[in-house]
């Protein structure tokens, strides 16, 4: 049984003027010890998805349909008290710019101790401190920095502290939303390698969310490409990269300048992402799709299986591939 | 491609420092050296990339060139004319020739000015055109950055535009005076990949059409490769390596450049990337300002040479130079 199973998830927001359909019909599963990356541009719904999995949507957000089954339990059916037992202990999260989420007036070590003792009230403080020292060693922060304040840490160190916090209660799943975006390239690489190492060592499942496709590709076994609230392509990372099928995936891949290979003209998809207040019928990518035909505007896009490890949400792809 | 190989901009031993604010209980204010006597030449018509991480001093270079800041020491020459002493009309003339595109499209546009007002403002300040022609020139500028038809955009305010659209407005505004040099400071780092790619292509088109010289400041080596003819790599206020973009990126000689390349996440999974391994596993503890700025992290360095002396910029052939004793 997969560790996490999400079926037909719809997430909406109440906004001025109506309902914003931020995420529609998302389904995926994640096995123990595997990592899944979600890539997409601003507004595609990836952060909303991450928050929804931990039931941390803002007050105007709600899951309107679908299932989230984690470790055999229905997350949607839990009340807030039950969710508190799930968060940090079973699922933990590394937020965007998490380094800024560290309490500036509390020593870093104490903040992590607090996270541990809150969820394991029987643990003594000095035992918790020992755990923090071990965690720091794990993530590469020198032990003598435990009593420092956040402002005394560099960006990379703060991020490592946040990762230590996310690991503190030995969760089964970590949701990492842009964990390295605010960091320089060299530090980013070090943090990503560390996350990969920790994942392998402790067999933690990770959901990795980013707008940067190269970062996600580096750390994820499987990858999901999101556009305008929908999952448009999903599968084994190498396979999706080597033969992307969805026109958006292809356009996204060709928006990134590369260091190696031929220096080709970047050919991004023109235009901008659609308004999700009144998403049109049919495929949400219709207006920007170079392959669209008239029936794409009327019929919702369908899932087409390219291989056991690769599927794409595209009416045309099915026809083109003769599948 | 560079049509004319004369230098249009020269920086000569530029030294710039900032004073950090001392705190009441904490450390006294101290000097941070942002640029440590750097010199470089930018050729007319080229897109010159300045690549560095945060804190490297790259934005400071841009701000000095457009005279938003003054260096403590050193000179800057535009077409042979020293710019630091410009005043009055000469300064105004300078501002027509050198323009800037800032990183944050959410902060660089005046929220009270419509697109039309924002883009036409430079024309009004420099007394170019009259009531009839100003609007026409402005519409053309707005159209040229892909905001088409201009009628759809001229009356909008920044809050009614997306990040990508705002940055296009910023570009239109920078270009409307037909400047000779444009400093683009991380113009797309706050934008999504596909929007960023669109903006890059606009900059390339503009260079083709008018032979403008660009200084493109970025932390992205890949973006620098795409846009730039030549690249300089900057680290802690010092230039580490300069040369043609393809040469630097495929044949980097400075350990810092090599470390940057090694750190890039692999997008083309099939590529055979060389691993330079120029970064030490653990940083050395060193006294500040003793020797090469990269010494504490460098795997190919040694205490006696690199730890005590700042390596000079060494010519390596093919217009490629590196500030390293072992390059």
Image: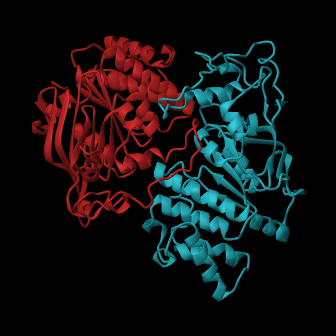
How many numbered discs? 0
Q: In which quarter of the image is residue A95?
A: top left
Please tell me whether residue B168 is drawn above or below residue A36 in the rendered image: below
- The residue at 39%/58% (across/down) is A290
Q: x and y percent of residue B256 in the render? A: 67, 27
Q: Is residue A293 left or right of residue B323?
A: left
Q: x and y percent of residue A41 in the render? A: 40, 49
Q: x and y percent of residue A256 in the render? A: 51, 44
Q: In this view, does B149 lie to the left or right of B214?
A: left
Q: In which quadrant of the rendered image does the C terminus of chain B lie?
A: top right
Please tell me whether residue A7 is drawn above or below residue A294 in the rendered image: above
Please tell me whether residue A163 is drawn above or below residue A64 in the rendered image: above
- The residue at 81%/18% (across/down) is B308
Give the residue at the far bottom of this rendering: B132
- The residue at 65%/88% (across/down) is B131
Q: Which residue is nearer to you in this view: B326 or A83?
A: B326
* Chain that the image shows in red: A
Q: x and y percent of residue B130 in the render? A: 69, 86
Give the residue at the far left of this rendering: A77
Residue A280 shows in the view: no
Chosen colour scheme? by chain
Q: Which residue is nearer to you in this view: A281 or B176?
A: A281
* Chain that the image shows in cyan: B
Q: Which residue is nearer to you in this view: B112 or A251?
A: A251
Please tell me whether residue A286 is drawn above or below residue A170 in the rendered image: below
Residue A4 shows in the view: yes
């Amino acid at each position: 049984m997969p560790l996490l199973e999400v079926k037909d998830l719809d997430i909406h927001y109440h906004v001025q003027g109506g309902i914003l359909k931020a995420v529609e019909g998302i389904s995926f599963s994640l096995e123990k010890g595997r990592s899944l990356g979600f890539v997409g541009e601003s507004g595609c719904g990836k952060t909303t998805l991450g928050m929804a999995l931990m039931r941390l949507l803002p007050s105007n957000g709600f899951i309107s349909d679908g299932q989230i089954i984690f470790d055999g339990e229905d997350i949607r059916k839990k009340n807030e008290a039950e969710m508190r037992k799930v968060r940090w202990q079973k699922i933990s999260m590394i937020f965007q710019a998490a380094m800024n989420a560290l309490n500036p007036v509390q020593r870093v070590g104490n903040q992590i101790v607090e996270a541990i003792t809150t969820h394991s009230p029987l643990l003594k403080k000095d035992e918790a401190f020992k755990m923090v020292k071990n965690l720091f060693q794990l993530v590469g922060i020198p032990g003598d920095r435990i009593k420092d304040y956040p402002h005394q840490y560099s960006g990379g160190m703060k991020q490592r502290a946040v990762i230590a916090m996310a690991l503190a209660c030995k969760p089964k799943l970590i949701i990492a939303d842009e964990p390295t975006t605010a960091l320089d390239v060299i530090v980013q690489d070090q943090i990503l390698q560390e996350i990969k190492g920790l994942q392998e060592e402790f067999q933690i499942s990770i959901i990795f969310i980013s707008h940067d496709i190269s970062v996600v590709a580096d750390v994820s076994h499987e990858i999901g490409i999101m556009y305008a609230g929908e999952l448009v392509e999903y599968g084994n990372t190498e396979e999706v990269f080597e033969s992307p099928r969805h026109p958006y995936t292809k356009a996204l891949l060709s928006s990134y300048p590369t260091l190696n290979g031929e220096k080709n003209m970047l050919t991004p998809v023109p235009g901008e992402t659609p308004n999700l207040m009144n998403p049109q019928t049919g495929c949400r990518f219709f207006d920007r799709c170079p392959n669209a035909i008239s029936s794409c505007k009327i019929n919702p896009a369908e899932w087409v299986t390219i291989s056991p490890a690769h599927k794409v949400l595209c009416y045309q792809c099915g026809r083109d591939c003769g599948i | 491609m560079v049509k004319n190989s004369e230098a249009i901009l020269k920086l000569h031993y530029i030294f710039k420092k900032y004073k950090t604010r001392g705190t009441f209980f904490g450390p006294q204010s101290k000097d941070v050296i942002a640029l440590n006597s750097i010199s470089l030449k930018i050729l007319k018509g080229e897109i010159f990339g300045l690549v560095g991480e945060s804190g490297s001093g790259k934005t400071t270079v841009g701000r000095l060139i457009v005279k938003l800041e003054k260096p403590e020491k050193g000179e800057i020459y535009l077409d042979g004319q020293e710019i630091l002493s410009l005043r009055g009309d000469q300064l105004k003339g300078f501002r027509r020739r050198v323009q800037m595109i800032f990183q944050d499209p959410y902060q660089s546009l005046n929220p009270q000015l419509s697109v039309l007002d924002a883009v036409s403002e430079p024309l009004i300040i420099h007394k170019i055109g009259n009531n009839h022609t100003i609007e026409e020139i402005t519409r053309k500028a707005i159209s040229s950055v892909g905001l088409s038809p201009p009628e759809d955009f001229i009356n909008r305010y920044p809050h009614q535009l997306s990040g990508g659209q705002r940055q296009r407005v910023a570009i239109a505004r920078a270009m409307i005076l037909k400047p000779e040099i444009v400093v683009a400071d991380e113009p797309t780092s706050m934008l999504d990949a596909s929007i960023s790619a669109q903006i890059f292509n606009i900059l390339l088109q503009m260079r083709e059409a008018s032979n403008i010289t660009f200084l493109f400041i970025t932390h992205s080596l890949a973006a620098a490769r795409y846009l730039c003819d030549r690249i300089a790599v900057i680290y802690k206020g010092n230039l580490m390596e300069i040369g043609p973009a393809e040469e630097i990126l495929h044949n980097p000689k400075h350990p810092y450049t090599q470390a940057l390349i090694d750190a890039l996440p692999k997008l083309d999974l099939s590529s055979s990337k060389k691993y330079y391994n120029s970064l030490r596993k653990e940083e050395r503890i060193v006294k500040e300002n003793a020797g090469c700025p990269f010494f504490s992290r460098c795997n190919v360095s040694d205490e006696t040479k690199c730890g005590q002396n700042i390596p000079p910029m060494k010519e390596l052939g093919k217009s490629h130079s590196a500030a390293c004793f072992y390059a």
